[in-house]
Amino acid sequence: MRAVVQRVSRAKVTAEGVATGEIGRGIAVLLGVGHEDTEKDIMYLADKIVNLRIFEDENGKMNISLLDIKGELLIVSQFTLYGDCRKGKRPSYDMAARPEIAEKIYNRFVEQCKGYGIKVETGKFQAMMSVEICNEGPVTLLLDSRKEF
């Protein structure tokens, strides 16, 4: 699994003209599912994201997590995170999971995150979405459950 993780003051996703998810202070996650991803990847990435120490403490140092601030989480499916642009001009998505598999893994990831007792909102799987992210900092991190980067 791959994720673009952004610390936000607010974020919102709209699909087909309807807001499907909206959060205040927390983390916005753009999540890609690879064809080899398993429960192990779900567990690793969910734990990593909710426990990332990317929020500032009283000394202004990034030292506290989403769980510590009781923040909110917006998770948006984005298969293009598996776009391979190394050859030619058109990305290859061969490493992305097929939609019927990716949706199950995505939904399982969302449920795993909800298990931490935080507010979790989502986009609409396989829909054309508009995502508004007010990146705070800015703080943006790239995560890969296989630690490929």
Image: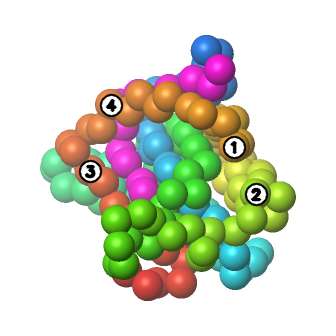
Type of amino acid at the residue the image marks with label 4: Cys
| CA distance for labels 2 and 3 | 29 Å
Q: Are marks 2 and 4 in contact (CB under 8 Å)?
A: no
Residue 99 drawn in magenta: no
Please tell me how crowded label 2 is: few (under 14), some (14-19), or many (20+) other residues with Cα within 10 Å.
Answer: some
Kindly identify the amino acid type of the residue bearing the numbered disc 2.
Answer: Pro
Q: Which residue is mark 2?
A: 99
Q: Which amino acid type is marked by label 1?
A: Gln
Residue 46 percent location from the top left of the image:
61, 63
**Do the numbered discs 1 and 3 sit on residues whose CB atoms are within 8 Å?**
no
Can the viewer see residue 51 in this picture? Answer: no
Q: Foreground: 75 or 65?
A: 75
Q: Can see residue 37?
A: yes
The quadrant holding residue 65 is bottom left
Image quarter in which the N terminus is found? bottom right
* Residue 126 tag number: 1
Viewer-nearest residue: 79 or 91: 91
Q: Quadrant of residue 102?
A: bottom right
**How far apart, in angstroms, are the residues tagged by discs 1 and 3?**
26 Å
Residue at image point 67% right, 36% down? 127
Disc 2 to disc 3: CB gap under 8 Å:
no
Look at the image and tell me in which quarter the C terminus lies. Answer: bottom left
Q: Residue at x 47, y 43 (%)?
A: 28
Picture layout, residue 148 above or below residue 93: below
Region in magenta: 1-16
Report the side of 70 relative to 88 (left or right). right
Assign the magenta stretch its main secondary structure: strand
Mark 4 or 3, nearer chain start? 4
At label 3, the amino acid type is Val
